């Protein structure tokens, strides 16, 4: 065998090895491209989910602020009702005291009935407790 034939055989073996390596490399590159396409799809889905979450957060924030405004309005109406009921109760107490004094000065027999009625009324008189806390503390600072 001549040297040129040995070199050509060696070159054929090396070219065959290179061809095999290129095939393996091509398979790996195609698998990587498929993975990259899948990753692109996954990233697009994540972007959509993030956008939807942002929209949901904005809607939730607007709903919460609407609820806070509604709650503030109801609290203010309740406080106004409490003030009105306090005035009415105080007025009723003053009227009852005046009637009681006038009956005592007249010395009528109704004075026995009036204290019993006053006792019954004292049992059903509403006890109004007004919160001394600021509105922000009551609502938990929700805005």
Image (spheres, rainbow, N blue to C red):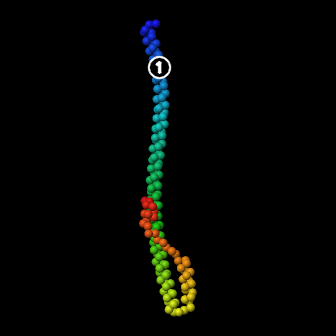
Residue at (43% x, 65% y) in the render: 135
Residue at (46% x, 67% y) in the render: 75
Residue 96: x and y in percent read 50, 84
Residue 9: x and y in percent read 46, 12
The one of 17 and 53 positioned closer to us in this rendering: 17
Residue 87: x and y in percent read 46, 77
Residue 87 vs 53, above or below: the answer is below
State the residue position of label 1.
Answer: 17
Residue 86: x and y in percent read 47, 76
Q: Is residue 135 left or right of residue 123?
A: left
Residue 111 vs 85, above or below: the answer is below
Report how many numbered discs are placed on residues in the image: 1
Q: Quadrant of residue 143?
A: bottom left
The one of 42 and 14 positioned closer to us in this rendering: 14
* Camera sees residue 81: no
Residue 100 vs 3, above or below: the answer is below
């Amino acid at each position: 065998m001549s040297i040129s034939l040995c070199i050509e055989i060696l070159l054929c073996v090396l070219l065959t090895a290179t061809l095999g390596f290129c095939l393996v490399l091509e398979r790996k590159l195609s698998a990587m491209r498929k993975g990259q396409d899948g990753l692109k799809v996954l990233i697009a889905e994540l972007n959509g989910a993030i956008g939807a979450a942002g929209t949901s957060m904005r809607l939730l924030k607007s709903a919460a602020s609407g609820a806070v405004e509604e709650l503030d309005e109801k609290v203010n109406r309740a406080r106004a009702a409490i003030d009105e009921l306090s005035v009415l109760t105080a007025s009723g107490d003053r009227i009852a005291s005046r009637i009681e004094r006038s009956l005592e000065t007249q010395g009528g027999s109704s004075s026995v009935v009036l204290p019993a009625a006053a006792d019954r009324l004292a049992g059903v008189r509403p006890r109004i407790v007004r919160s001394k806390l600021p509105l922000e503390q009551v609502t938990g600072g929700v805005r």
